[in-house]
Image: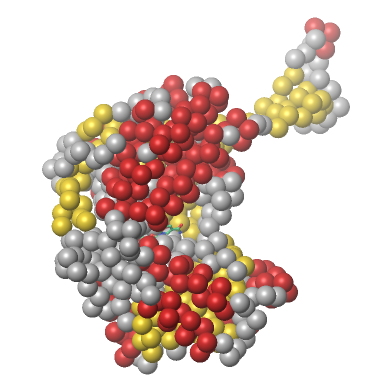
Amino acid sequence: MAIETTTYDHIIGGSRYAGQGDRVADVYDPATGATMRRVRLASEADADAAVASAAKAYESWAEASVTARSRVMYAFRQLLVEHETDLAEVISAEHGKTIDDARGEVVRGREVVEFACGVPELLKGEYSDQVSTGVDTFTFRQPLGVVAGITPFNFPAMVPLWMHPIAIATGNTFVLKPSERVPGASDLIARLYAEAGLPAGVFNVLHGDRVAVDALLRHRDVAAVSFVGSTPVARYVHQTASAAGKRVQALGGAKNHAVVMPDADLDHAARQILAAAYGSAGQRCMAISAVLAVGGIADELVAKLRDLTLGLRVGPGTSPDSDLGPVISPVARDRVVGYVDQAERDGADVVVDGRGTTVPGHDEGFFVGPTLLDRVSSTMSAYQDEVFGPLLCVLRVPSLGTALELVNANPYGNGTAVFTASGGVARTFQRQVKAGMVGVNVPVPVPMAFHSFGGWKDSRFADHHIHGPEGVRFYTQAKVVTTRWPERADRGSTGFAFPTAS
Ligand code: NAD
């Protein structure tokens, strides 16, 4: 299964749909800088068409048995296995990450489908017999209707898969607005759903930019919005869709700290932090971008990190010899370089310098090499901002308490990790740190699909975390039914006092 088109159309009601506008955007190969394809940018009328298709499909999909919905998920899951390489290749080509890394995101996304296969169990309600004489009560959950997902460029398959399998398995219909920079994975996923037997219109892909997002956020027939992306847009999506009366979950950006204690196994910590900082060229919301070296270990830890970083190979994501690929755009590359320049001017040590990295044969690619800064202070912009590139800052701190103060003062609170040999230190850290996902000797503590994913503070604007049990709650609403089936002899008594159990 390959991408054959030169321009990605929307996929609405099971068919390709060019839309009513003529706006398009280029889709780049970040390793060469060349335009590979183009993607349609939806108009408001195109968003209306996608929502109308989903609303029509909802009428029958919400009535499909939970077993039928589960079977579609099983078939879809099998197709994701069979087409793992196809998906990984298109992700790598458009995003720039290595094929192995792309394969990993497909697998982690597939795990949400495996969770959604269990929807008959997930939707089992609660029943109370004889709550009053002759009266029973039961609670069950029903879908919301048409729900929308708006997703970022950095996980073209996995982040949308956090959303749509659970939404669809619980009986909703879905409009996905993927990142316009990486549309290919969603095109393939739509084809796999159709092959799995999902009725047309249950899963729709609307390509576009802010115009499409705004139309979905305000659309009368969209019941709920799931968003993952940068913090300013997450805040905007949360406020706009909430004001329009929708249920919203909006996950934002991050600045994830690894705290390395003096008793940690430094070889293990350095190797783990290396992968967490530079994997996917640092373009992960759970990437470690700040190391807090506690006590006197900083020199030794920085030396180990330097040696490992110097061994990394930068190249196109499609090459098996690359450890990390390019970043998504020239703007993203220049942004990373700008932060390094500024930190250097402010007094940080540039231990490994990725500025000016070139890859032979890929002169126009958006490459920046892994960069390690030491003696960074908490006032430097490279520490304060989400850089979203292969830049790791080391800050030297005297104690666990100071480390916790720094992590907790940071406006973001997505993930964090502590490296230590002490159960007591780990317990203090996990209880006192203000972040939604915590690793103990695990640098990227992304929960499995049967738990829920979400940060704290400016990393999430919503009541619900994403996927897992909270995903099921987000995409459904509870109904509680109280029943009485009176025998003939019981009929006829009328009471005007507020009813109590008898
Ligand atoms: P982004 O916020 O620029 O874009 C995300 C989505 O919003 C895209 O579909 C885009 O088309 C749309 N969008 C962009 N600007 C918009 C605007 N002004 N109004 C309405 N819609 C708009 O994010 P990105 O650059 O694609 O992705 C990287 C960001 O996503 C990073 O900040 C990263 O931390 C974050 N992220 C967070 C998580 C998480 O789970 N918390 C996961 C992955 C990525």
Q: 247 or 156: nearer the eye? A: 156
Q: Position of residue 216 (x, y in %)?
A: 34, 43
Looking at the image, the residue that sits furthest to the top is 488
Q: Position of residue 179 (x, y in %)?
A: 31, 51
Quarter of the image with the C terminus in it: top right
User: Is 153 rendered above or below residue 398?
Assistant: above
Quarter of the image with the N terminus in it: top left
User: Is 486 rendered above or below residue 18?
Assistant: above
Residue at 17% in and 48% down:
37
Coloring basis for residues: secondary structure
Looking at the image, the residue that sits furthest to the bottom is 347
User: Is 201 rendered above or below residue 223?
Assistant: above
Counting labels gives 0
Q: Position of residue 211 (x, y in %)?
A: 25, 49
Q: Left or right of 317: which side holds 374? A: right
Looking at the image, the residue that sits furthest to the left is 22
Q: Left or right of 91: which side holds 400? A: right
Residue at 59% in and 46% down:
450
Which image quadrant for residue 435?
bottom right
Camera sees residue 48: no
Query: Which quadrant of the picture is home to ligand 1?
Result: bottom left
Q: Position of residue 485 (x, y in %)?
A: 75, 15
Which image quadrant for residue 119?
top right
Looking at the image, the residue that sits furthest to the front is 321
Q: Left or right of 46: which side holds 415? A: right
